[in-house]
Image (tube, rainbow, N blue to C red):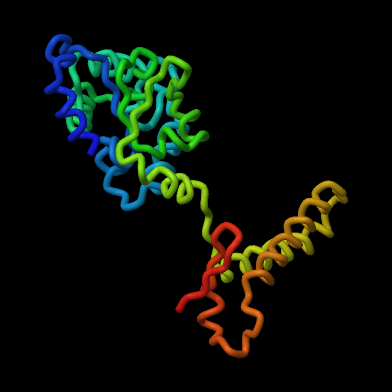
């Protein structure tokens, strides 16, 4: 959808009159990473974790400077790529190609180019989720014009974005882990604050577990209630 939108932008009079219309496309690391090994990882979480590891684990160069282990996370190249991005209206495939050409990370170059962007294209979640928007430094103020595609799905998208699902098996496992930690820390140097917060956490998990269990477990097989799912404040049992 992002690429389709960019192709439509190129057909407008704005892009024809100004081919350098400063456009930035934001997407996940999974979609924008050009590291040959990292981009082969299956999940977005694995890509994010590996990216952080490579960026934070620095090595010394011959000039005794600290340098990231990711060959594409080089700040000077990223700044150059951010400038090149705004010399044409680029879609996601264009950004990946430019990243390969300049040997610079398109993900961080796109974020570096936000301050000078006239048009920013991104998934709804990036804009609507406050923490994600702030971490990406997406500029939103009174002068910003926001256009949402398929806005009739906005309520469902917001509900899904701020909903967390936990199975009763996960809650039970967390409760057992916290209880075990509480017993272990009794042998350590006393810390009233730590003990207080751990006990609060244990009681919360116990209350969640009890609230998720059906009233009469004898009528349900154990395999069914163990998969009982807590969504916000409701418990949905598998049919």
Percent x, y for residue 91?
20, 29
User: Where 5 sits versus 238, above or below?
Assistant: above
| Quarter in which the N terminus is drawn | top left
For residue 106, say whether it is visible. no
Q: Quadrant of residue 180?
A: bottom right
Reply above or below: 94 against 180: above
In the visual, does 194 lie left or right of 14? right
- Pinpoint residue 191: horizontal percent, then vertical percent: 85, 48
* Rendered location of residue 11, percent (x, y): 12, 23
Position of residue 63 relative to residue 32, above or below, is above
Residue at x-position 54% and y-position 72%: 228
Residues 159 and 122: in front is: 159
Given residues 211 and 144, the one toward you in this image is 144
Task: Give residue 31's quadrant in the image.
Answer: top left
Q: Quadrant of the C terminus?
A: bottom left
Q: Position of residue 97 (x, y in %)?
A: 17, 29
Q: Is residue 98 left or right of residue 239?
A: left
Q: Is residue 14 visible?
A: yes
Residue visible at 56% across and 78% down in the picture: 225
In the image shown, does 231 or 20 lie closer to the viewer? 231
Residue sitting at x 48%, y 37%: 129
Residue nearer the viewer, 62 or 163: 163
Q: Residue at x 33, y 32 (%)?
A: 122
């Amino acid at each position: 959808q992002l690429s389709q939108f960019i192709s439509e932008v190129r057909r407008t009079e704005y892009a024809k009159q100004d081919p350098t219309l400063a456009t930035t496309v934001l997407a996940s690391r999974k979609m924008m990473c050009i590291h040959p090994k990292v981009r082969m990882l299956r999940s977005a979480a694995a890509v994010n974790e590996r990216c952080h590891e490579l960026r934070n684990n620095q090595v010394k160069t011959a000039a005794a400077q600290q340098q990231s282990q990711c060959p594409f996370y080089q700040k000077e190249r990223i700044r150059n790529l951010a400038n090149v991005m705004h010399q044409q209206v680029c879609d996601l495939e264009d950004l990946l190609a430019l990243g390969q050409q300049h040997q610079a990370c398109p993900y961080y170059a796109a974020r570096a180019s936000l301050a000078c962007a006239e048009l920013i294209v991104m998934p709804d979640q990036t804009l609507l989720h406050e923490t994600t928007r702030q971490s990406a430094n997406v500029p939103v103020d009174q002068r910003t014009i926001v256009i949402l595609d398929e806005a009739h799905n906005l309520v469902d998208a917001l509900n899904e974005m701020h909903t967390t699902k936990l199975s009763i098996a996960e809650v039970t496992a967390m409760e057992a882990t916290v209880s075990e930690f509480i017993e272990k820390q009794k042998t350590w140097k006393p810390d009233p604050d730590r003990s207080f917060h751990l006990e609060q956490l244990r009681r919360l998990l116990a209350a969640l577990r009890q609230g998720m269990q059906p009233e009469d477990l004898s009528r349900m097989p154990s395999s069914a209630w163990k998969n009982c799912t807590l969504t916000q404040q409701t418990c949905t049992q598998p049919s």
